[in-house]
Image: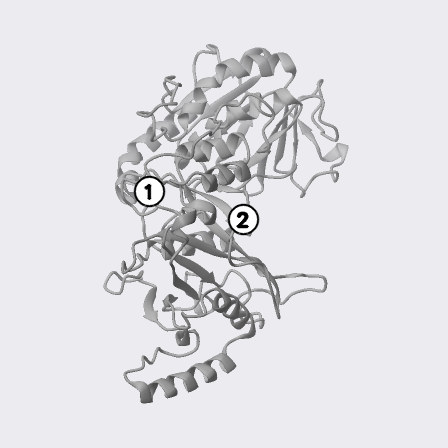
């Protein structure tokens, strides 16, 4: 989307729903209005069935906006383009000020679901498939004053999220959280992450190619993200919707918002719902060093030194936040969504002869993955529940002895099958880990509201890289830079 048009280098903004199938033809007088209506009628007949079903759904909400502003890709995905979303429409919504719902622009994607139904983007559905493509489209509501032109960064954000879905196959669900670690609009905003909700006005629709749910991306603060991780995304969304300063019940994002929703809980005191995350993770066999105080093996220390030497160059290339706010290179953070259960790919399918039992394990996590170790221990393992980190097929699960169906046992606590490592944590080890890993919670992004009332934690985060060690259990955990993980 180019800056001249308010779009990226791979797209263009045009003011017409007709651009779904043809360039916009703005009416210049009453005579041409009839011609434009005829063009629209013809365009609707030519419009792919999946696209038309979504467009009709939007038209029911925005009947007076048949030609919304729209971002469309220059080179379509099926022709080799990098952006999966064919179109992103921007509808003006006056909100309901008396209900604390501010006026806003409503961004709606077209392309995560199957628009064409001919296999050009999504595989042809198999018998029993009920979803169109990935079964969802993305939306975002951005607070704006009347007469204010819509910025295009939300469209770039939705494109980045769509690329992530297409690249990984991981779909978002309502209640999920997305760690972004950068102001959504590239400014100094405290709104730096996303929660996922169902769109309050665009409901699930049945198209000729299957059902489509509209999922709304909701900007949130670091404090709100932590509350979602340690509790429930739905609970945080409810608190945001009930706070008149936070966008109202339609969850309108305002990048100028200076505080989090009230009554958030960010401390882990009880069982949490978050069962796992995607993160940078790896492991190697445990090697006892002559001095257990030594954090890392010489080879790993050498790799880290090389990484740190590359660090300044890497940060310069990607910006001070570690992100480049462009359509083609904006990256998802390491956290993508909770895993509802142990990995399906191997659960209940292992054989005794396919399991390798290790004498000890040296677990390696990136900053964000390690920041959830206190939650994994205090909010899961000590409550007889498991917690999982996953990077692609590579998977690590911490679990207490009480979890049934595991192939790690009290006698053989480190069990590996394929790319899935299970680490059984007995209660006495979990209690000791709880104390030692507590400072790791501060590895996550610093709370942008530490200057406000309600911030109690003053613990200093440890400096990366470093290692925690439990020699008696032959377990080490190292926290390394992202660049150490393939």
Left or right, residue 246 beside residue 9: right
Instruction: Locate residue 79, reporting x and y percent.
Output: 44, 70
Vertical side of 235 occupied by 142: above or below: below
| Crowding near the residue tagged with mark 1, few <14, some 14–19, many ≥20 C-alpha atoms within 10 Å | many
Q: Compared to 50, does 328 lie above or below? A: above
Give the numbered dot on residue 183. 1
Q: Is residue 438 left or right of residue 132?
A: left
- Residue 237 can be seen in this image: yes
Q: In terms of depth relative to the viewer, which is nearer, 306 or 133?
A: 133
Mark 2, residue position: 172
Q: Residue furthest front?
A: 98
Left or right, 153 with reference to 478:
left
Residue 402: % across, % down: 72, 22
Q: Could you say whether the residue bearing mark 1 is in a helix, strand or loop?
A: loop
Horizontal and vertical percent position of residue 138: 48, 56
Residue 9: quarter of image: bottom left
In terms of image quadrants, where is residue 109? bottom left
Q: In what quadrant of the picture does the N terminus appear?
A: bottom left
Q: Residue at x 33, y 81 (%)?
A: 25
Q: Position of residue 156 (x, y in %)?
A: 37, 55
Q: How many neighbours does mark 2 have within 10 angstroms: few (below 14), some (14-19), or many (20 or more)?
A: many
């Amino acid at each position: 989307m180019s800056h001249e048009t308010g779009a990226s280098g791979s797209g263009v903004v045009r003011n017409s729903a007709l651009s779904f199938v043809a360039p916009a033809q703005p009416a210049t007088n009453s005579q041409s209005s009839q011609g434009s209506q005829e063009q629209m009628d013809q365009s609707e007949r030519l419009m792919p069935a999946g696209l038309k079903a979504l467009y009709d759904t939007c038209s029911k909400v925005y009947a007076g906006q048949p030609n919304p502003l729209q971002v469309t890709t220059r080179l379509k995905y099926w022709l080799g383009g990098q952006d999966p979303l064919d179109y992103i429409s921007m509808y003006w919504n006056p909100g309901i000020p008396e209900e604390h719902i501010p006026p806003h622009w409503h961004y709606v994607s077209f392309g995560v679901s199957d628009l064409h139904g001919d296999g050009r983007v999504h595989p042809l559905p198999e018998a029993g498939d009920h979803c169109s493509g990935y079964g969802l489209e993305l939306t975002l509501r951005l607070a704006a004053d009347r007469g204010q032109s819509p910025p295009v960064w939300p469209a770039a954000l939705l494109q980045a999220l769509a690329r992530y879905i297409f690249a990984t196959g991981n779909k978002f669900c309502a209640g999920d959280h997305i760690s972004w670690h950068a102001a959504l609009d590239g400014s100094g905003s405290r709104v730096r992450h996303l929660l996922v909700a169902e769109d309050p006005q665009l409901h699930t629709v049945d198209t000729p190619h299957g059902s489509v749910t509209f999922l709304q991306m909701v900007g949130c603060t670091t404090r709100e993200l932590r509350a979602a991780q340690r509790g429930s995304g739905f609970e945080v969304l409810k608190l945001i919707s009930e706070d008149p300063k936070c966008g109202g019940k339609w969850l309108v994002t305002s990048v100028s918002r200076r505080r989090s929703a009230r009554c958030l809980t960010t401390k882990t005191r009880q069982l949490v719902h978050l069962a796992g995350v995607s993160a940078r993770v790896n492991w190697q066999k445990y090697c006892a060093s002559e001095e257990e105080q030594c954090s890392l093996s010489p080879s790993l220390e050498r790799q880290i030194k090389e990484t740190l030497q590359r660090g300044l160059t890497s940060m310069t290339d990607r910006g001070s936040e570690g992100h480049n706010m462009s359509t083609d290179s904006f990256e998802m953070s390491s956290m993508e969504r909770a895993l509802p259960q142990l990995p399906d790919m191997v659960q209940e399918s292992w054989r005794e002869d396919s399991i390798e039992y290790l004498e000890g394990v040296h677990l390696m996590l990136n900053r964000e993955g390690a920041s959830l170790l206190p939650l994994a221990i205090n909010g899961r393992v000590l409550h007889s529940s498991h917690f999982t980190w996953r990077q692609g097929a590579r998977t690590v699960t911490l679990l207490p002895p009480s979890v049934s169906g595991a192939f790690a046992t009290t006698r053989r606590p480190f069990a590996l099958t394929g790319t899935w490592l299970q680490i059984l944590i007995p209660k006495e080890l979990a209690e000791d880990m709880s104390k030692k890993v507590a400072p790791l919670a501060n590895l996550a992004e610093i709370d942008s509201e530490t200057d406000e009332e309600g911030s109690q934690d003053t613990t200093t985060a440890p400096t990366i890289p470093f290692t925690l060690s439990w020699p008696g259990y032959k377990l080490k955990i190292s926290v390394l830079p992202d660049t150490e993980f393939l």
